[in-house]
Image (cartoon, rainbow, N blue to C red):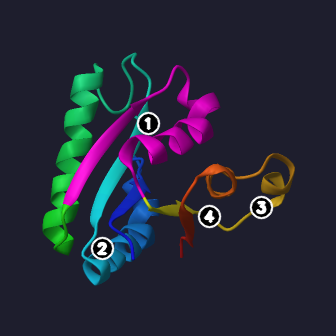
């Protein structure tokens, strides 16, 4: 049913990703799908690295480790954004098309009052992506 699962990741804060990573790995094994781990970064130095190449290397290493740990094919994609804090939602929607994903598995948090005012990243991706989106809440 699914052949390519996109998982947005913030490898600087992997603790909140655990459940989404496990769900994506389980679905990948079940369907024989590839998982593409997607990170968003600016081209300027940031938490992922000093250059886009360094950031892409870190994401590729993360993806390889996930694939090995969970027993599925894994790839990575670094999406460059002018300002990730502002453009994250649209950058992730574009990454769905860029990667050819047919399912997005995305970590989220339990909604708070602010989410009712400005919405959530997962909600935006679910509303605008051209594929199915599974939002996985943390513990």
Q: Residues within 10 Å of mark 4 (few under 14, many from 20)?
A: few
| Residue at 44% in and 36% down | 40
Mark closer to the chain start, 3 or 2: 2
Q: Nearer the viewer, residue 95 or 16?
A: 95
Q: Which residue is mark 2?
A: 28
In x, y percent, where is residue 67? 18, 64
Is the residue under label 4 in contact with that under label 3 (CB below 8 Å)?
A: yes
Label 4 vs label 1, nearer the camera: 1
Mark closer to the chain start, 2 or 4: 2
User: Which corner quadrant holds the C terminus?
Assistant: bottom right
Mark closer to the chain start, 4 or 1: 1
75 magenta-colored:
yes
Q: Secondary structure at mark 2?
A: helix
Label 3 vs label 2, nearer the camera: 2
Rounded to the nearest whole Å, what is the CA distance between mark 3 and mark 1?
24 Å
Is the residue under label 1 in contact with that under label 3 (CB below 8 Å)?
A: no
Q: Is residue 39 above or below residue 129?
A: above
Looking at the image, how many numbered discs can be counted on the residues? Answer: 4
Q: Is residue 113 above or below residue 118?
A: below
* 55 to the left or right of 100: left
In x, y percent, where is residue 17? 43, 62
Q: Which residue is mark 3?
A: 112
Rounded to the nearest whole Å, what is the CA distance between mark 3 and mark 4?
9 Å
Is the residue under label 1 in contact with that under label 4 (CB below 8 Å)?
A: no
Q: Which residue is mark 4?
A: 109
Q: Residues within 10 Å of mark 3 (few under 14, many from 20)?
A: few
Q: Is residue 9 above or below residue 82?
A: below
Q: Which residue is mark 1?
A: 40
């Amino acid at each position: 049913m699914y052949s390519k699962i996109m998982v947005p990741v913030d490898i600087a804060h992997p603790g909140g990703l655990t459940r989404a990573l496990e769900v994506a790995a389980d679905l990948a094994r079940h369907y024989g799908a590839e998982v593409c781990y997607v990170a968003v970064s600016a081209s300027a130095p940031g938490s992922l690295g000093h250059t886009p190449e360094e950031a892409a290397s870190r994401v590729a290493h993360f993806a390889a480790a996930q694939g090995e740990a969970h027993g599925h094919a894994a790839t990575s994609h670094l999406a460059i954004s002018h300002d990730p804090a502002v453009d994250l939602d649209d950058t992730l929607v574009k990454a769905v098309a860029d990667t050819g994903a047919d399912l997005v598995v995305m970590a989220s948090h339990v909604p708070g009052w602010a989410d009712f005012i400005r919405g959530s990243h997962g909600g935006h991706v679910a509303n605008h992506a051209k594929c199915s989106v599974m939002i996985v809440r943390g513990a």
